[in-house]
Image: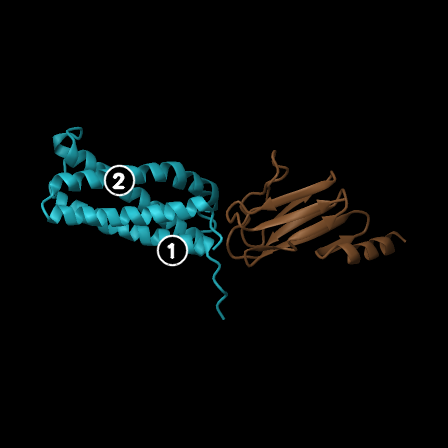
């Protein structure tokens, strides 16, 4: 393994957050809606902080200068897909928090079928997490050359 | 005479690929997540070029404070050169993979 400590830490933290969202979904099924709201909100906000402090600066320094010229390289393509999907998922999750948990969003922009939105975001979050794992492996794990 | 001196000197001291006429240039390969050679001893005024042969980006960053040299992220076959004008020992590492380290001793 050749990863820096911060990358290991963020990777483990992202896995923990993915699991935490699953626990949150389970709480909703058990009708523990208050606990569900707290857990999902904390997870989404914590992820926002990690994205803003660690992922965006790293992406801007190491990946975005190579787009679009080197999108054909797997390490750029994976990181770009992870970044794009991650951005959409995080913004959608924040929107759900605001729309469902606060009165800040105007009535006509509120979510009606919120369960569908939440389940879609949860599925997309896990896809984002798997892309993140693939990106981590591609950037930091020395794989033997294929013959 | 000069060529003979450098040829002898280089074969004794250096393990990197070397082209010695008036000034020396050395190449450090970045391959399999390591710098090769890891330790390099050169003369003052020598230019060292790092070449990334891996299929993943690497960088070359001085570990001294303040930083003596710092490359951008080098893609496959990208190069970074630095001329050492002062004697000393210069440690360096890859900022993307910090366990990759190397050292240049300038005499």
Residue B34 as seen in the image, left or right of residue B19: left
The crowd level at tag 1 (other Cα within 10 Å; few <14, some 14-19, many 20+) is: some
Residue at 27%, 37% (x, y): give it.
A45
- Where does label 1 land, which residue? A134
- Relative to A78, residue A51 above or below: above
Residue B83 as seen in the image, left or right of residue A107: right
- Relative to A54, residue B38 above or below: below
Residue B53 image point, x, y percent? 58, 57
Residue A90, picture quadrant: top left
**Viewer-proximal residue among A9 and A71:** A9
Chain in cyan in the render: A
How many marks overall?
A: 2
Chain in brown in the render: B
Q: Is mark 2 on a helix, strand or loop?
A: helix
Quick check: marks 2 and 1 in contact, CB under 8 Å? no
Q: Is residue B84 visible?
A: no
Disc nearer the start of the sequence (2/1): 2
Residue B12 image point, x, y percent? 79, 57
Chain ID at mark 1: A
On residue A44, the disc is 2
**Viewer-proximal residue among A89 and A23:** A23
Residue B11 image point, x, y percent? 78, 58
């Amino acid at each position: 393994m050749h990863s820096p400590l911060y990358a290991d830490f963020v990777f483990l933290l992202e896995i923990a957050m993915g699991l935490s969202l699953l626990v949150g979904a389970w709480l909703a099924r058990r009708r523990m809606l208050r606990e569900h709201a707290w857990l999902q909100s904390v997870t989404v906000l914590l992820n926002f902080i990690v994205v803003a402090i660690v992922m965006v600066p790293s992406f801007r320094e190491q990946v975005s200068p190579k787009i679009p010229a080197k999108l054909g390289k797997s390490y750029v393509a994976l990181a770009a897909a992870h970044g794009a999907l991650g951005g959409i998922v995080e913004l959608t999750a924040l929107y759900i928090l605001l729309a469902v948990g606060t009165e800040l969003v105007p009535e006509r922009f509120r979510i009606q079928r919120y369960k569908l939105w939440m389940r879609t975001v949860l599925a997309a979050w896990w896809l984002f997490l798997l892309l993140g794992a693939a990106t981590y492996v591609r950037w930091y794990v020395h794989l033997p050359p294929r013959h | 005479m000069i060529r003979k001196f450098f040829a002898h000197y280089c074969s004794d001291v250096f393990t990197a690929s070397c082209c010695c006429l008036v000034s020396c240039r050395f190449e450090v390969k970045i391959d399999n997540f390591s710098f090769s050679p890891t330790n390099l001893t050169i003369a003052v005024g020598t230019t060292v070029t790092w070449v990334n042969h891996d299929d993943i980006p690497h960088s070359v960053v001085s570990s001294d404070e303040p930083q003596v040299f710092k490359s951008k992220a080098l893609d496959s076959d990208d190069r970074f050169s630095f001329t050492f004008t002062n004697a000393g020992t210069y440690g360096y590492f890859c900022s993307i993979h910090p366990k990759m380290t190397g050292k240049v001793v300038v005499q």
